[in-house]
Amino acid sequence: MQFYMPTKLYSEQDCIKNHAEELVTFGSRAMIVTGKHSSRANGSLADVEIALKNEGVPYIIYDDVEENPSIETIMKAKEIGLQENVDFVIGIGGGSPMDAAKAIALMIANPEETEEVFYEPKQLDYLPVICVPTTCGTGSEVTPYSILTIHKQRTKKSIKHKIYPALALLDASYLKSMPRRGLVHTSVDALAHLIESYLNTNSNDWNRVYSAQGLRVWAQFKRNLLDDELKEEDYEKMLRASALAGMAITHTGTSLPHGLSYAFTYEQGYSHGKAVGMFLAGYVSIYKDKTVVQEVLELLGFENIVEFKKYMKELLGPILVDKEVLQNSVRKIMADAAKLKNYPFAVTEEELLTMVEV
Ligand code: NAP
Ligand code: FE
């Protein structure tokens, strides 16, 4: 058993303002990494800029991060960061900018390395990373993972390097500008992390503290999320469940739904949350230890698998699954021992094909 959770985390209203002094202890010139629009609309970028200005720390903004960031985006940012001599990186946004911030921090600290290094098992340093999440799904603000799109392989893959953010600043008010679809999809990603972590080869008493509590918190807002009647306090719960889920997968990794999902994001353009969410009911259905499945359902406040399945269907709406994409994804995962190892039982191609309705 190993437990390592080095990210310092604050969660409160006006979080960035309240911790501005600490924010600038990580370097003398910052690179803000963010997406094109949302961080401007929800106020998170302005809050970081004001904090840096007030503390007299210069910064540059790299706002070219697309959804499911590509290796090309990282390499472009690396050049800019090197030219500008930045020495710490602040990722603001959903998983895409936060994951990009981590990969950029790795590349700037190792200017001689090429993109090949992302998938080489090499011990490398990285610049300090600070994360400000504005979605409630990935938990990337506390995980060491960075998932990049590899166009050459028509898929996404987690890089080999573990990059733990030094500081995570959580303020649920940034979530309020998110359309319902975004809230649903990213919350479902967090739910997938919780379930895949609890039902995992690496699951144990230490990390189930996080997955179990995350599932309890998720249960508290599940009805309001479905009914589109989120209350003020639900936003904080959604962000909390997402960070707890991140702490859980930091120690267990994800499992079959995540492994199967990437092809659907690449080939069908499904958001990450929707692509993992469509496999969740199927995952609990094929999972062989039904006692543990029952624990998960109880923590989430569902009587049985049928009830859970119905909820997921209502929440995600109709989903068109391309049969060929599914077959290819299943074949790929069956041939990848590393991807199967987090599922504690033997599994067949036929079982995987039943995880989603075509
Ligand atoms: P995202 O790809 O970061 O963002 C999706 C969309 O939501 C973007 O259009 C973004 O706009 C917008 N958005 C973000 N915050 C918003 C807000 N508060 N209000 C309105 N719109 C907002 O979404 P995500 O689901 O959080 O991240 C998905 C990525 O994370 C995937 O690449 C996935 O593989 C990865 N992931 C990482 C981990 C990990 O542990 N590191 C775990 C799971 C998934 P802008 O582009 O304008 O910002
Ligand atoms: Fe995920």
Image (spheres, rainbow, N blue to C red):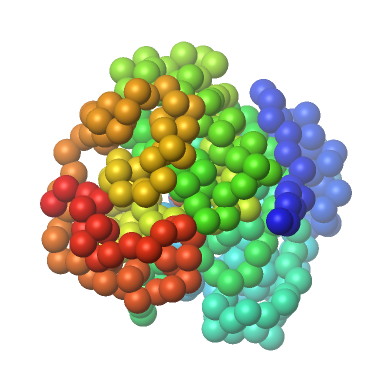
Position above or below: 210 against 358: above
Closest to the observer: 92 or 83? 92
Asked if 230 appears above or below 168 in the picture, the reply is: above
Q: Is residue 299 above or below residue 121?
A: above
- Residue at x 39%, y 40% (from the top left corner): 290
Residue 90 coordinates in the image, percent (x, y): 67, 51
Quarter of the N terminus within the rendering:
bottom right
> Can I make out residue 175 in this image?
no
Q: Percent x, y for residue 134?
A: 53, 38
Instruction: Tell me where residue 117 appears, x and y as whole percent.
Output: 59, 81
Based on the displayed image, in which of its 4 quarters is residue 146 positioned? bottom right
Q: Is 150 displayed left or right of 94 in the figure?
A: left
**Residue name at image x 30 percent, y 33 percent:** 305
Comparing 215 with 292, the one in front is 292
> What's the residue at 38%, 57% (across, down)?
256
**190 left or right, relative to 113:** left
Identified at 57% across, 24% down, the residue is 236
On the rendered structure, is 104 left or right of 55? Answer: left
Up-down relation of residue 72 to residue 165 (above or below): below
Q: Tell me how many marks there are.
A: 0
Q: Can residue 207 be seen in this view?
A: yes
List x then y, in percent, for residue 314.
Answer: 23, 29
